[in-house]
Image (spheres, rainbow, N blue to C red):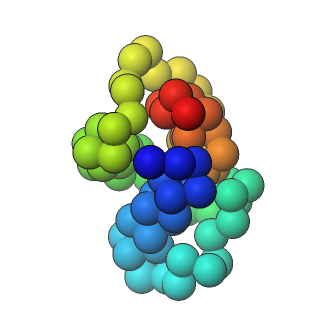
Amino acid sequence: MNTARIQEELREWIAKKNKKSPDTIGDETNLIEEGMISSLDTLELIFFIESLGGKIGKLRAGVFENLNVIVKTFFVI
């Protein structure tokens, strides 16, 4: 799966969780500051990332900041 497809899958998942249109979520939208991802959502998001083929290693602050950071952190493309 390429970067664009992974970002689209993540965008759709986040939009569905927030009952928003995927078009409202950009690659650089700060998901934490915008309230789209909470600390309670992160575990579910981790499972979703794994289902897309992402590799979860050590987590650090900022890895769920936006779609670009998520893809860079969890996917080797």
Q: Which quadrant would the C terminus be assigned to in this image? A: top right
Find residue 49 and report its image quarter: top left
Q: Residue furthest front?
A: 1
Residue 50 rendering spot, x and y as whole percentages:
30, 38
> Relative to residue 41, is residue 77 drawn left or right?
right
Image: 50 above or below 35: above
Q: Residue furthest right?
A: 28
Image: 32 above or below 56: below
Image: 17 above or below 28: below
Q: Please indicate, yes or no, whether residue 11 appears anywhere in the rendered image.
A: yes
Residue 25 rendering spot, x and y as whole percentages:
62, 70
Image: 5 above or below 22: above
Question: Residue at point 55% right, 40% down?
Answer: 70
Question: Residue at point 64% right, 78% down?
Answer: 24
- Tally of numbered tags: 0
Of 22 and 61, nearer the camera is 22
Of 53 and 65, nearer the camera is 53
Q: Please indicate, yes or no, whether residue 43 appears anywhere in the rendered image.
A: no
Of 32 and 68, nearer the camera is 68
Question: Residue at point 39% right, 65% down?
Answer: 13
Find residue 33 and report its image quarter: bottom right
Question: Residue at point 62% right, 80% down?
Answer: 23
